[in-house]
Image (cartoon, helix red, strand yellow):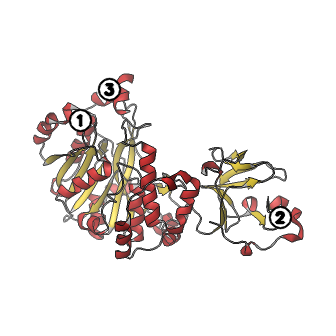
Amino acid sequence: MKEMFKINQFNLMASEMIALNRSLPDVRLEGCKNKLYPDELPRTSVVIVFHNEAWTTLLRTVHSVIDRSPRHLLEEVVLVDDASERDFLKRPLEQYVRRLEVPVRVVRMEQRSGLIRARLKGASVSTGQVITFLDAHCECTVGWLEPLLARIKLDRKTVVCPIIDVISDDTFEYMAGSDMTYGGFNWKLNFRWYPVPQREMDRRKGDRTLPVRTPTMAGGLFSIDRDYFQEIGTYDAGMDIWGGENLEISFRIWQCGGTLEIVTCSHVGHVFRKATPYTFPGGTGQIINKNNRRLAEVWMDEFKNFFYIISPGVTKVDYGDISSRTTLRQKLQCKPFSWYLENVYPDSQIPRHYYSLGEIRNVETNQCLDNMARKENEKVGIFNCHGMGGNQVFSYTANKEIRTDDLCLDVSKLNGPVMMLKCHHLKGNQLWEYDPVTHLTCGKHQRQELGQQRRSLEHYPPAG
């Protein structure tokens, strides 16, 4: 079992012991099971990209799509082979899918092109009015498709994602995902799940069966109207292989007049792996840095500084020509990133208003505050200043917080310690005063020591 695990970074032996058309629990909210959807919904093509995928996980994905989708809504399944080397994914796969009751096409990429370009190829040969992208190790549950297509029928500029349930990479047990999380990102432009904020619960009047407006999507599973996909510029074909494309399309959808939702009545399972079995030409870090640099340059305006200061190595990466993407942004009359932060993602880890962004240095000792990659409820650290960004980047916000990503420096006792706690925006133990004359920073307990030299922070110029 351990030897087979290495091949795909999941328990292949367990997968091979499970039926390709296995039963799955109905994990929907009770209110979802009684919902009625229009008979006339747009038909969808399901596009699945694979590279050296295991036989059983790939075909279980296909069978779950066919078995749990109303036949009149499923146009076809398009399997895009991104230059797999395994023999069973060649002729045997083509012979197998030929026998299925829904048209299944296998399209081959001539050379390893990565997820982005392979998906573009699949989309270009598909014929359905809606394109649904799935990963190659998914399983669709009962009632997954109708709520996605119903949202697009209501507004074709709505891009929809299911709740992504977890299929254990160890046992292949199916576990329901939460309808109380949505997609965000941190300062390093890593996609992250965060709790659905109260404002979004209020907008839905507490009805959890209504779709959640999400700032970003995970990227592996979503449905989009074919014509709208073309209008907003599909994917950035200048991006390589994988990484960053999910945030890029999320920013673009919102800033250019669309809506991005998690449809809580739709559930699709996904095998989440602890490591990737794939190699990337040029190295993973280099590719993701290039892709993130492109999305930052095109979509993030001045807020790209957060990313560059925390990851200064990114600015040395050749990110290619972005003129076609900046032209697309102008043509679509897209809104600025500040609008996105204000209206779509006000709880973002990137503060919309801040005085400074960078290191906090003791000039006598040349030591810097460092979050030491510690977590919530742990102490902030001190380390030699290295000038490489990362864990030594803090922002001093307009709320007078000292912030590292979604954590704020918090001091509750006169002599410390200084802890890193979730930012609560209520000032109190997270309010820090800065004196531009003495260059001293202190929490509220030490404020009296600053004397009369303090100037108003409003006169302290914002720094890049």
Image depth: mark 3 or mark 2 in front: 2
Q: Residue at x 11, y 45 (%)?
A: 101
Q: CA distance from mark 3 to mark 2?
A: 65 Å
Q: CA distance from mark 1 to mark 2?
A: 69 Å
Mark 1, residue position: 20
Give the residue type at disc 3: Met
Of 40 and 74, the residue lying toward us: 74
Give whichever of discs 3 and 1 has the lower sequence position.
3
Q: CA distance from mark 3 to mark 1?
A: 13 Å
User: Where, quadrant-wise, is the C terminus in this rendering?
Assistant: bottom right
Give the residue type at disc 1: Leu
Q: Secondary structure at mark 3?
A: helix
Residue 13 is labelled as: 3
Q: Secondary structure at mark 2?
A: loop
Q: Residue at x 37, y 62 (%)?
A: 321
Task: Give the image location of residue 4, x and y in percent.
Answer: 34, 25
Classify 10 Å Cα crowding around label 2: few (below 14), some (14-19), many (20 and above): few
Q: Secondary structure at mark 1?
A: loop
Relative to 228, 96 lies left or right:
left
Give whichever of discs 3 and 2 has the lower sequence position.
3
Answer whether residue 311 is visible to the viewer in this image: no
Q: Is residue 373 above or below residue 235?
A: above
Give the residue type at disc 2: Thr
Image depth: mark 3 or mark 1 in front: 3
Give whichever of discs 1 and 2 has the lower sequence position.
1
Of 330 and 49, the residue lying toward us: 330
Mark 2, residue position: 438
